Image (cartoon, helix red, strand yellow):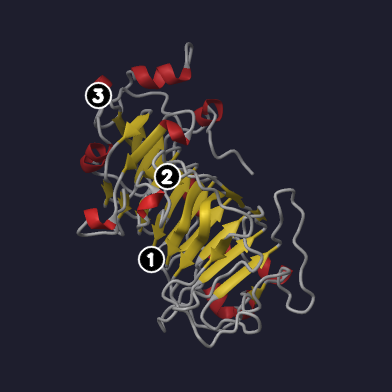
């Protein structure tokens, strides 16, 4: 597992802003004519393009804000030693929000190619409130989160809007359906923490969308309530499902969740998947049937010591899993790469046997319908800003006191 809690300043120095990038600076103190709120900087953004992005550099601090980003090609770049040093936090639920889901941070569909690095987004609503409490609702296509923490309990992240999104080296915590939605999203080397019994995912992937939520080389661990108002519960052994199908009854929905080479602690239930029985499909026998409403699959699941879970020779599934899940072979797994997941749908339409469920469904394009290369886009995202006065517009040749102080004496 790569270190998700820190971007070393030394390595960050090697990252440079793209030429002509438009830079904005946020500092709670207002030093060097910086913005004092992140939303003010977002509101000021203008003139950015796909290659000339608006980079918002955020000084360490806790920002008690509700944020909305509706402009394309905007980046948040935290300037602390770890994501926890730059935290956007608020207590918010749907009853406090007449127009949305009660999220603290809203990345609108119009915010194409939004990126965030080295920050924390938190909904501080206590778990005891037993309600939706989103940290982030992310709807924009080609969105990337790098070394970002998402903290909440129920419904921490909603990822939707017919979008494609990439999470790398992120930390996500919650207890009930805390990663959910209909987008195609890859979680690459992420740490996923369950703070109580419940469900990690609740996908409602469209039947015509090739892929839903895909976890690559990630780690699932139990955790403990963070909020001082809560009772300090922890996810016990065999108490957390990998997922359950949201909107399973919708004819246009066929939830898709895949875990590839995932390390799982003992809190993950042996049967792994919940059919949402009681409100789920009454025709499904969890002991014998393959669920026609879901696309749930795993490849090479293992414990935290990297010991692989044995495979049932009859079903091809990891031992103990519900028999209505889909078996994934080596041949299937090799196709779950970024270039194929985020390529055009032609690959999946031309090769239905590449997917575990093998439906032969005709899939429709997402976003602009063109192939997306998230790693090439990620290369545009800067790290610590070494030069530039903390002005509200374009950078100058003067040095910002905060950004030089962050690097220590003698920084160049």
Find numbered disc 2 in the image and state the secondary structure of the residue it sits on.
Answer: loop
Secondary structure of the residue carrying tag 3 is loop
Is residue 337 something one can see in this rendering?
Answer: yes
Where disc 1 sits, the SS reads loop
Judge the density around disc 1: few (<14), some (14-19), many (≥20) Cα neighbours within 10 Å: few
Please identify, in this view, whether the residue under mark 3 or under mark 1 is nearer the observer: 3
**Residue nearest the viewer, comparing 176 with 89:** 176
- Which residue lies under the disc numbered 3? 30
- Determine which residue is flagged by label 2: 230
Q: Is residue 272 left or right of residue 56?
A: right
In terms of sequence position, does the residue under pointer 3 or pointer 2 come before the other? 3
Tell me which label, 1 or 2, sits earlier in the chain: 2
Circle 1 sits on which residue?
368
Q: Give residue 347's position: percent from left, percent from top.
A: 56, 73
Q: Is residue 412 visible?
A: no
Frontmost of labels 1 and 2 is 2
- Asked if marks 3 and 2 touch (Cβ < 8 Å), the reply is no
Q: Residue at x 26, y 52 (%)?
A: 70
**Which mark identifies residue 155?**
none
Q: Position of residue 27 (x, y in %)?
A: 30, 27
Crowd around label 3: few <14 · some 14–19 · many ≥20 (10 Å): few
Q: For the N terminus, which image quadrant?
A: top right
In the displayed image of the protein, which residue is found farthest to the front?
231
Give the percent coordinates (x, y) of residue 275. Answer: 53, 75
| The one of 299 and 361 positioned closer to us in this rendering | 299
Q: Are marks 1 and 2 in contact (CB under 8 Å)?
A: no
């Amino acid at each position: 597992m790569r270190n998700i809690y820190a971007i070393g300043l030394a390595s960050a120095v090697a990252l440079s802003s793209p030429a002509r990038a438009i830079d904005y600076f946020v500092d709670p103190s207002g030093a060097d004519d910086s913005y004092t709120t992140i939303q003010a900087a977002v509101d000021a953004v203008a003139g950015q393009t796909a290659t000339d992005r608006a980079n918002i550099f955020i000084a360490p601090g806790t920002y008690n804000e509700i944020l909305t980003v509706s402009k394309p090609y905007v980046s948040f770049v935290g300037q602390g030693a770890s994501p926890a040093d730059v935290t956007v936090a608020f207590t918010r639920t749907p009853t406090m929000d007449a127009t949305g889901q009660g999220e603290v941070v809203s990345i609108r569909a119009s915010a194409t190619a939004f990126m965030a690095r080295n920050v924390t987004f938190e909904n501080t609503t206590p778990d005891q409130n037993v309600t939706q409490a989103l940290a982030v609702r992310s709807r924009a296509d080609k969105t990337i989160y790098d070394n970002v923490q998402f903290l909440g309990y129920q419904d921490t992240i909603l990822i939707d809007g017919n979008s494609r999104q990439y999470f790398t080296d992120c930390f996500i915590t919650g207890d009930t359906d805390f990663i959910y939605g209909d987008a195609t999203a890859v979680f690459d080397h992420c740490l996923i923490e369950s703070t109580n019994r419940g469900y990690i995912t609740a996908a409602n992937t469209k039947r015509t969308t090739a892929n839903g939520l895909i976890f690559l080389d990630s780690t699932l661990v139990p955790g403990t309530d963070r909020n001082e108002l809560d009772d300090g519960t922890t996810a016990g052994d065999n108490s957390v499902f990998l997922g359950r199908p949201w909107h399973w009854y919708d004819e246009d929905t066929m939830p898709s969740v895949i875990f590839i080479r995932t390390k799982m602690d003992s809190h993950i239930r042996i049967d792994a998947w919940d059919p949402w029985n009681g409100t789920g499909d009454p025709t499904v026998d969890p002991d014998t049937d393959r669920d026609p409403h879901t696309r749930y699959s795993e490849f090479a699941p293992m414990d935290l010591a990297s010991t692989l879970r044995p495979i049932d020779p009859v079903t091809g599934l990891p031992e103990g899993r519900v028999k209505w899940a889909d078996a994934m072979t080596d041949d299937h797994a090799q196709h779950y790469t970024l270039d194929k997941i985020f390529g055009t749908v032609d690959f999946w339409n031309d090769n239905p046997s590449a997917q575990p469920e093998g439906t032969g469904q005709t899939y429709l394009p997402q976003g602009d319908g063109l192939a997306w290369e998230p790693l090439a886009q990620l290369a545009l995202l800067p790290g610590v800003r070494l030069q530039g006065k903390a002005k509200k517009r374009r950078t100058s040749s003067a040095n910002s006191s905060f950004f030089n102080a962050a690097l220590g004496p003698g920084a160049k």
